[in-house]
Image (spheres, helix red, strand yellow):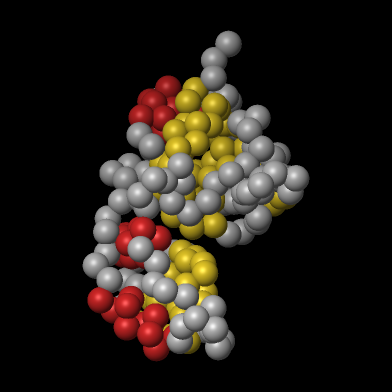
Amino acid sequence: MRLLPSGSAALLVELADLDAVLALYAALTDRPPAGVVDVVPAARTVLLVTDPAVTTLAAVAAVVRTTVPRPGTPAGAEVVQLPVRYDGADLAELAGLLRLTPGELVRRHTAREWTVAFCGFAPGFGYLTQPGGDWDVPRRATPRTRVPPGSVALAGEFSGVYPRQSPGGWQLIGRTDVAVFAVDREPAALLRPGTRIRFTEVTG
């Protein structure tokens, strides 16, 4: 663990890997240090944003160093159901690359809950991990210039849902009609760090 100031009001915690990030994020979310107003995970870091009128970076750093990481999701994490029509343009080819049938790939994608590890790329885009999923999905050799909103995709160890039309190199396996980001909704982002996701197959 390496702790670095990020400006005058935030502390950046660098960690070894994503598992360490998720464990520290869960612990800090369950019991945030006094004066911390936001905890933001990423692939290898956790950013703690503070209120300088309440605390100091040194005080927050002292708490972080004594925090015991807790594997799992934050207590009371929301569960979101996402119905998916698994008809993605890359489903059949990707299944072949993974030595699965398309049906087996779908069953593997829906068999266990996913968790939003962190957000990025575009507003509302969550990087979802599946504990024990052991996914290792290659990105497309040639990214698409336009991926439709609601596209459900895989890349590396992650799954994701495109919140709006955008370029993208992830493998498209399906689509959902659920708006994962809407500016007129509070909160606007449906997929937030720590949220648990259950994908369900839509047929017919």
At x 32% / y 62%, what residue is drawn?
27
Residue 66, horizontal then vertical, whole percent: 25, 76
At x 32% / y 45%, what residue is drawn?
131
Residue 110, horizontal then vertical, whole percent: 41, 30
- Residue nearest the observer in this picture, 83 or 185: 185
- Residue nearest the observer in this picture, 80 or 128: 80
Residue 181, horizontal then vertical, whole percent: 66, 45
- Quarter of the image for the C terminus: give it: top right
Name of the residue lying farthest toward the top: 204
At x 57% / y 24%, what residue is drawn?
85
- Quarter of the image for the N terminus: give it: bottom left
At x 32% / y 83%, what residue is drawn?
62
Q: Is residue 149 above or below residue 103?
A: below
Q: In the rendered view, does 56 fall on the left or right side of 177? A: left
Q: Is residue 170 above or below residue 25?
A: above
Q: Is residue 21 visible?
A: no
Callout count = 0
Residue 63, horizontal then vertical, whole percent: 32, 78
Q: Tell me which corner region of the image, top left, top right, bottom left or bottom right, holds residue 53.
A: bottom right
Q: Is residue 106 above or below residue 194?
A: above
Q: In the rendered view, does 96 fall on the left or right side of 83? A: left
Q: Is residue 13 visible?
A: yes
- Residue nearest the observer in this picture, 119 or 85: 119
Q: In the rendered view, does 28 fall on the left or right side of 36? A: left
Q: Tell me which corner region of the image, top left, top right, bottom left or bottom right, holds residue 2.
A: bottom left
